[in-house]
Image (tube, helix red, strand yellow):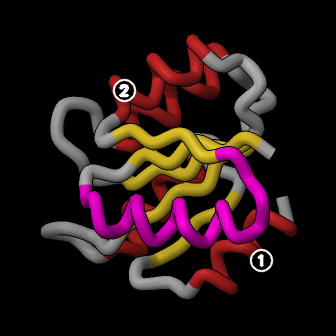
C-alpha cells in the first residue's frame, strides 16, 4: 500500500517510515502540508495520508480540509503531540474535519499499524 507521511519533525517521519516499510508499504514523505499535497497530485494511487497537525507553512488541519475536498476517499490518520493547547483538542478538531482516526504522540509502531489495519 502507498502511504504519505507528513510531519515537520524528521525523526518522527523516519520512525513512521521505518515501521511502514517493515510491513512492505511504499512510503512518500513531506515536511509540511504543501509538500504533501504536491505528492498527492503526483501519485494518485496513495491510499493513506498520515499527517501531523502542527507544522510550518501548511498545518495538518488545513491539509485535511484540502484533501477532503479533492480526494474524498483518502484515508487520513491525524497525529499530534499538541502545542500550546492539549493534543486532545487538535485531535478532536481533526476528527471533526474528516480524519478517519487520530493518534497522540508519542505512539508505538504497533499502535500505528493497528490504526492502519482498522481503516
Q: Secondary structure at mark 2?
A: helix
Determine the main secondary structure of the stretch shown in magenta.
helix
Magenta segment boundaries in residue numbering: 9-26
Q: Residue 94: horizontal and vertical position, in percent?
A: 50, 52
Residue receiving disc 1: 114
Identify the residue at horizontal 50%, vertical 84% (top origin): 107
Mark 2 and mark 1: span between their CA atoms? Answer: 26 Å
Q: Residue 45: horizontal and vertical position, in percent?
A: 77, 24
Q: Is residue 16 magenta?
A: yes
Query: Relative to residue 26, is residue 40 depicted above or below?
Result: above
Picture disc at residue 65: none
Position of 27 with respect to 81 (left or right) is right
Quadrant hosting residue 98: top right
Q: Secondary structure at mark 1?
A: helix
Identify the residue at horizontal 64%, vertical 74% (top origin): 112
Q: Residue 30: horizontal and vertical position, in percent?
A: 38, 38
Quadrant hosting residue 106: bottom left
Identify the residue at horizontal 58%, vertical 22% (top origin): 40
Residue receiving disc 2: 35
Position of 77 with respect to 117 (left or right) is left
Amino acid at each position: 500500500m502507498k502511504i504519505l507521511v507528513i510531519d515537520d519533525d524528521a525523526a518522527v517521519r523516519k520512525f513512521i517510515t521505518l515501521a511502514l516499510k517493515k510491513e512492505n508499504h511504499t512510503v512518500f514523505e513531506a515536511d509540511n502540508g504543501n509538500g504533501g499535497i504536491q505528492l498527492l497530485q503526483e501519485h494518485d494511487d496513495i491510499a493513506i495520508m498520515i499527517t501531523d497537525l502542527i507544522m510550518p507553512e501548511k498545518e495538518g488541519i488545513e491539509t485535511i480540509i484540502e484533501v477532503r475536498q479533492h480526494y474524498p476517499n483518502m484515508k487520513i490518520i491525524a497525529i499530534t503531540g499538541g502545542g500550546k493547547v492539549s493534543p486532545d483538542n487538535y485531535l478532536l478538531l481533526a476528527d471533526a474535519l474528516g480524519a478517519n482516526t487520530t493518534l497522540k504522540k508519542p505512539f508505538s509502531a504497533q499502535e500505528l499499524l493497528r490504526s492502519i489495519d482498522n481503516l
